[in-house]
Image (spheres, grey):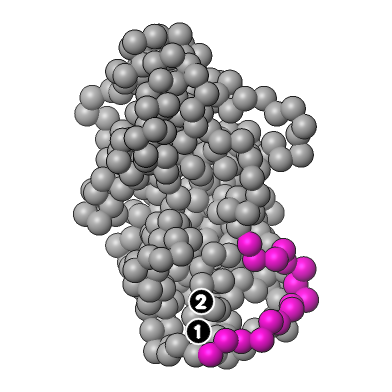
């Protein structure tokens, strides 16, 4: 939705459109149960039925010859078993565009979204304990790693890493372990979707070498003044085969009949209680380990991406707020970032 809004404002018409009848179709992960079907050896007639059914998810009345249509189902990225289904059903060799947000912000936004109707939501820090315990039991983290509750009681040791990882574990092994842990219900897991390197690994293997995967940073699209936005918009247009587009005037507001929600990232507009600084500090150790894998997977431009740099680049980067944050990490006061 963010990409669509940027393109519409910049190019004055809908050149890249989510023309599906539902906001997130979930065809491959929910409708056909792709992980349970062997698409490498499927009856051609059955495959044809799947293709016809998938075409029914698209609003053909809204399509034009000068439009490249796409569907938006973020959950596909955490369901790698659907890759054979996509390749078998989509004979037009679709391209995959993934937008990655700061993993800590994404996890907390996910929590806030699920709790927005809860008048007395449980604390985020308490909910993530269960996930951390799951990673320890699955062998993703060493047993000497600390849950947040344990870390909170560690006193001066809060400045040392609460997580311990297995040396020499490959990204392929991490990808397999995460997929095994979350083979079932992922709805109530807030941390999982932010482990980008293990999640993206099978998609890079399948689509990256064919230049059918583009991965960009979310922050480049929402910043009011960001030179990267223009660069990335042009990159998206080239990736989609629309690099011939020229900047055009503004387009009148057009309503559509597909029943899609208004294009707005509610997480940027709604207010919710800020994350405690010590929780963010704790998670920076966890995600930092996996963020460091992104350059080898996606390229050197992902080097040091989202490094928290608590004392320089944090949203609370003023001497007064940094002092409060340090006080909270040590003493458990109420500074936030």
The answer to which image quadrant residue 310 occupies is top left
Q: Residue at x 52, y 39 (%)?
A: 107
Residue 97 in the image: x percent, y percent? 45, 63
Residue situated furthest front in the rendering: 320
Residue 24 in the image: x percent, y percent? 66, 59
Task: Kindly report the secondary structure that dominates the magenta region of the rendered protein.
Answer: loop
Q: Which mark is residue 27?
A: none
The answer to whether residue 282 is left or right of residue 33 is: left
Q: In whole angstroms, how far apart are the C-alphas of marks 2 and 1?
A: 6 Å
Residue 197 in the image: x percent, y percent? 36, 44
Q: Residue at x 41, y 66 (%)?
A: 225
Instruction: Examine the rendering and report whether any part of residue 91 can be seen.
Output: no
Q: Secondary structure at mark 2?
A: helix
**Is 193 rendered above or below residue 99?**
above
Count of labels shown?
Answer: 2
What residue is disc 2 on?
7
Q: Which mark is residue 11?
A: 1
- Quarter of the figure with the N terminus: bottom right
Mark 1 Cα-neighbour bin, 10 Å: few <14, some 14–19, many ≥20: some
Does the segment drawn in magenta span residue 257? yes
- Residues 12 and 173: in front is 12
Q: Residue at x 48, y 16 (%)?
A: 332
The answer to which image quadrant residue 325 occupies is top left
Which segment did they paint magenta?
249-264
**Is 137 rendered above or below residue 112?**
above
Assess whether mark 1 and mark 2 are in contact (beta carbons under 8 angstroms): yes
Residue 182 in the image: x percent, y percent? 53, 34
- Residues 252 and 164: in front is 252
**Is 326 rendered above or below residue 274?**
above
Mark 2 Cα-neighbour bin, 10 Å: few <14, some 14–19, many ≥20: many
Q: Secondary structure at mark 1?
A: helix
């Amino acid at each position: 939705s963010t990409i669509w809004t940027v393109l519409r404002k910049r190019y004055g018409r809908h050149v890249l459109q989510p023309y599906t009848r539902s906001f997130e179709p979930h065809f491959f992960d929910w409708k056909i149960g792709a992980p349970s079907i062997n698409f490498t050896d499927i009856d051609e007639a059955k495959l044809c039925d799947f293709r016809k059914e998938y075409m029914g998810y698209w609003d053909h009345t809204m399509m034009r010859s000068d439009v490249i249509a796409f569907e938006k189902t973020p959950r596909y990225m955490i369901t790698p078993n659907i890759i054979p289904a996509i390749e078998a059903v989509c004979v037009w060799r679709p391209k995959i565009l993934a937008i990655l947000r700061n993993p800590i912000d994404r996890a907390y936004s996910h929590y806030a979204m699920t709790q927005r109707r809860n008048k007395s939501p449980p604390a985020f820090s308490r909910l993530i304990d269960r996930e951390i315990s799951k990673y320890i039991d699955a062998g993703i983290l060493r047993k000497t790693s600390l849950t947040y509750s344990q870390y909170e009681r560690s006193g001066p040791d809060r400045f040392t890493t609460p997580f311990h990882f297995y040396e020499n574990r490959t990204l392929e092994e991490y990808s397999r372990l995460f997929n095994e842990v979350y083979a079932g219900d992922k709805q109530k897991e807030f941390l999982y979707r932010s482990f980008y390197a293990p999640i993206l690994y099978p998609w890079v293997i399948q689509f990256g070498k064919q230049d059918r995967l583009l991965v960009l940073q979310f922050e480049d699209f929402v910043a009011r003044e960001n030179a990267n936005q223009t660069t990335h918009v042009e990159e998206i247009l080239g990736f989609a085969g629309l690099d011939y587009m020229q900047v055009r005037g503004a387009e009148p507001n057009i309503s559509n009949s597909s029943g899609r929600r208004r294009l707005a990232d509610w997480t940027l507009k709604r207010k919710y209680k800020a994350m405690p600084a010590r929780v963010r500090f704790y998670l920076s150790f966890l995600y930092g380990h996996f963020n460091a894998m992104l350059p080898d997977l996606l390229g050197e431009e992902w080097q040091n991406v989202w490094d928290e740099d608590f004392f320089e680049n944090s949203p609370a980067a003023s001497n007064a707020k940094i002092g409060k944050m340090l006080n909270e990490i040590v003493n458990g006061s109420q500074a936030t970032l």
